[in-house]
Image (cartoon, rainbow, N blue to C red):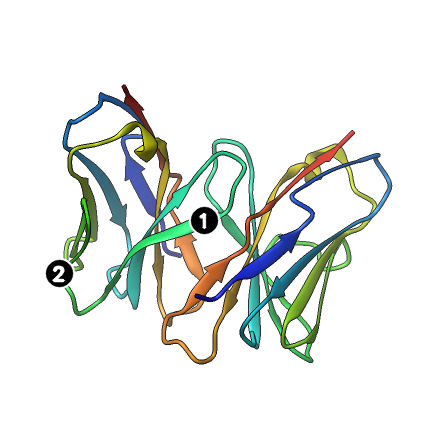
Amino acid sequence: GAVVSQHPSRVICKSGTSVKIECRSLDFQATTMFWYRQFPKQSLMLMATSNEGSKATYEQGVEKDKFLINHASLTLSTLTVTSAHPEDSSFYICSARDRQMKDGYTFGSGTRLTVV
Amino acid sequence: KQEVTQIPAALSVPEGENLVLNCSFTDSAIYNLQWFRQDPGKGLTSLLLIQSSQREQTSGRLNASLDKSSGRSTLYIAASQPGDSATYLCATTYTGNQFYFGTGTSLTVIP
């Protein structure tokens, strides 16, 4: 089945630094990838939709200059949290759509980000 | 905006019991509804996907139903096992793209 590899699974960083999270589709091409985050005790919320070769579409309230998304190829999308602060600590997870499969969405294993 | 609610938020049952998890959504014009399992600190595992035209889907001990007109779905787990302990999420989509997730039901099955 379709597999999405997400790295790193856990990261701890200092305030003010930047963190890059990678989401890679291993055995299929993903024209569209989605980035979600989940705060404790809350549901997963869509942050942005990234399309290969074009700019990402951000949901209302998500700062595009803070959460940089790059989808340079059909198999890789990256989310960079710039100048991270403790309130950015969250669980980030990506989802990719397999163009060959109807309704075929696969989720990565997620990244637990802790900013200290 | 679609709002998805799951009840109960947490559930603890002894092993072997049958149980029902509930999901309700405000906008019935969905494309499909999906149930996921999330283990602590892990990603999501898709359990069952119900298209808007379907009433239910079954996989092993799991059965999911969908009543689109009333905005409800249930996930039935038969003969629960300790390995079923996880958080269960339901999510709807409109055009098959963005998921709207519920807050989940945290299930603990006691041996």
The x and y percentages for residue B89 are: 36, 44
Q: Which residue is depicted at the point 28% across and 51% down?
A: B25
Q: Amino acid at mark 2?
A: Arg
Residue behind mark 2: B55
Q: Quadrant of the C terminus of chain B?
A: top left
On what subunit does the disc labeled 1 rest? Answer: B
Q: Which residue is depicted at the point 14% across and 32% down?
A: B18
Residue behind mark 1: B44
Q: Which of the pair A70/A107 is nearer the observer? A: A107
The x and y percentages for residue A62 are: 64, 54
Task: Please give left or right for residue B39 compared with residue A32 in the image.
Answer: left
The x and y percentages for residue A93 are: 57, 51
On what subunit does the disc labeled 2 rest? Answer: B
Q: Which residue is depicted at the point 28% across and 52% down?
A: B26
Categorize mark 2 by other alpha carbons within 10 Å: few (<14), some (14-19), many (20+).
few
Q: Which of the pair A109/B69 is nearer the observer? A: A109
Count of numbered circles on the image: 2
Categorize mark 1 by other alpha carbons within 10 Å: few (<14), some (14-19), many (20+).
many
Q: Quadrant of the N terminus of chain B?
A: bottom left
Q: Which residue is depicted at the point 57% across and 77% down?
A: A31
